[in-house]
Amino acid sequence: MPGTLLVAGALGLVGRAALQRFEAAGWEVIGLSRRPPDFGTRARFLALDLMDAAACRATLPGLGVTHLVYAALQEKPALRAGWLDAEQIETNRAMLAHTLAGLEGGPLRHVAVLQGTKAYGVHLGQMPIPGREDAPRHMHPNFYWAQEDLLRERAARGGWHWTVLRPQAVIGHARGSAMNLLAAIGAYAAISRELGLPLVYPGRGDRITEATDARLLASALLWAAGAEAARDQIFNVANGDVLTWRGLWPVVARVFGMEIGAPHPMPLTALMVDKEPVWQRIVARHGLRPGTLAELVGASWQFADFAFSREEQTASLVSTIKIRQAGFGDCVDSAAMLEWWLRHLQEARILPA
């Protein structure tokens, strides 16, 4: 039976998709976000600083939350350096701890949290292929481990269950996300077209990888909320096919009606520094929703450079056998996913058609 879902980080890539999926399934949904929603929803939204332990203890106990999707995340301005930063690790551990402290003692039954392929050391060099959930914990410092240890301890004490999902390269919509490849790809293509340029792949190498549609991930979260097989388990989640980002460039070119140029490795973090005037010209010409390029893309130029240019790695692939055998078998064609999302943002007047 549907319960009351609390989504922490409700306007991020994962949180927004989860909120909409659970809402469509008839759940009562409460979103935690510092900003109001920029889309239609029946969910109740609360502004709450998860680093404020007292505020969490004052606000959360009376909400009647049965399920938590914890998608809140703090990143450092220098994205990759932050992934090993002790302060960032403690911040993300504390945010989850404060949230759980505010919910314990109530009707809480299940908590879902997100990890990713950094669990397999993908940010450090060539990861084992495929990444498997039963692999020994990688020795590098990571907030994943701090949060996971906290989950296990609190769940054993509180009598509720948890699930950890590990997607790879989540594709969906959220404004200002630090790891939003969709926004980076779409804005880069639109700016290239505005400047009269062909669509050039800016990466280096052809690493074989995977992606996870935010809609599929949200469905996995809904499944995990009620499936006994998901209790106290860790699952990889991906679309089910493999890709190279350069191999998807024809999809981007088709959506924007562009010719493809010769690949030329170049850092988007450097190329986009002076492109705000170009973006504002695009916004005015196409009647897009007002906003700056930074508000749309956030720190995702850094993430795009990381995703597109890793010549030292041949692949980043995870096994999804475990979640399929447990009962969740949804799959998505990644090329169709990318086209759907780009056209969805065009229809929403976030990207130009």
Image (spheres, rainbow, N blue to C red):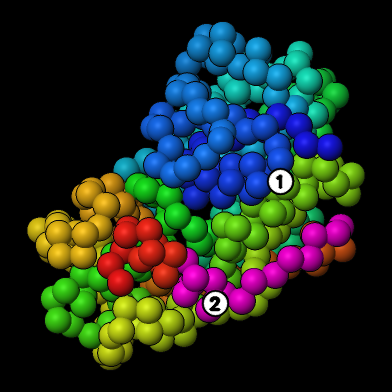
Mark 2 or mark 1, which is nearer the start of the sequence?
1
Above or below, comparing residue 169 to residue 152 in the picture: below
Image point 46% across, 85% down: which residue?
Answer: 247
Does residue 148 belong to the magenta stretch? no
Q: Secondary structure at mark 2?
A: helix
User: Horizontal and vertical percent for residue 209?
Assistant: 56, 73
Can the viewer see residue 283 in this picture?
yes
Q: Nearer the viewer, residue 201 or 87?
A: 201
The residue that appears at 37% across and 79% down in the rendered structure is 255
Instruction: Please report the residue visible at 71 percent of the width from the left and 19 percent of the height from the top.
Output: 64
Q: What amino acid is at disc 1?
A: Ala
Number of marks:
2
The crowding category of the residue bearing disc 1, from other C-alpha atoms within 10 Å (few below 14, some 14 to 19, many at least 20), is few
Horizontal relation, residue 319 to residue 12: left or right? right
Is residue 173 left or right of 24 when viewed as pictured? Answer: left
Provide the residue designation for mark 2. Answer: 336
- Reading the image, the residue beneath label 1 is 25
**Magenta-drawn segment:** 326-341
Q: CA distance from mark 1 to mark 2?
A: 24 Å
Q: Quadrant of residue 118?
A: bottom right
Coordinates of residue 146 in the picture (x, y in percent): 62, 34
Name which residue lies at 53% across and 78% down. Answer: 335
Q: Contact, CB < 8 Å: mark 1 with mark 2? A: no
